[in-house]
Amino acid sequence: AVDEARIKRKRPLNRKHWEILLEIHENKEFLAEMDDARLELLHGLFALEYINGGVWYDVNPLLKDSVVEYGEKYKSKKEDAP
């Protein structure tokens, strides 16, 4: 059931969404101003706002492994680029 939920969560995400989720995962915050894509991620519960000891953000636990995997691929492609 968890794998099915994970697959359904990933389906609507595009490259910009993945980049924003990686930013959130690495920094626990939104580094840029709130725009439509960031709001979509919050409203769709792809990114979650936590309010304990201050406000911070992270990706939905169902997506965390996929975001880490995306980050590893993204960083390796950036390093390989001339």
Image (spheres, helix red, strand yellow):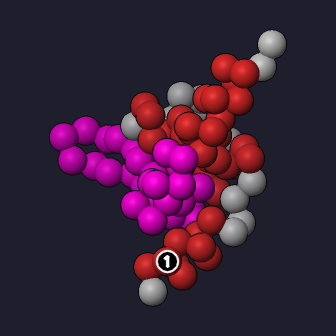
Which residue range is magenta in the image?
A: 41-69
Label 1 secondary element: helix
Residue 21 versus residue 43: which sits nearer the camera?
21
Residue 14 versus residue 72: which sits nearer the camera?
72
Q: Is residue 36 visible?
A: no
Q: Quadrant of residue 53?
A: top left
Crowding near pointer 1: few (<14 within 10 Å), some, many (20+)? few
* Above or below: residue 9 compared with residue 69: below
State yes or no: residue 63 in magenta.
yes
* Quarter containing the C terminus: top right
Q: Name, please, the residue furthest toward the front.
A: 80
* Above or below: residue 70 compared with residue 28: below
* Above or below: residue 13 compared with residue 51: below
Residue 3, position in %: x, y?
49, 77
Q: Residue at x 57, y 38 (%)?
A: 71
* Above or below: residue 22 compared with residue 11: above
Residue 48, position in %: x, y?
43, 55
Report the residue marked by disc 1.
3
Residue 22, position in %: x, y?
54, 40
Residue 32 versus residue 66: which sits nearer the camera?
66
Q: Name, please, the residue furthest toward the top.
A: 82
Q: How many marks?
A: 1
Q: Residue at x 44, y 59 (%)?
A: 60
Residue 57, position in %: x, y?
40, 45
Q: Is residue 39 left or right of residue 64?
A: right
Q: Is residue 80 visible?
A: yes
Q: Name, please, the residue furthest toward the bottom.
A: 1
Q: Residue at x 74, y 47 (%)?
A: 15
Q: Residue at x 35, y 41 (%)?
A: 56
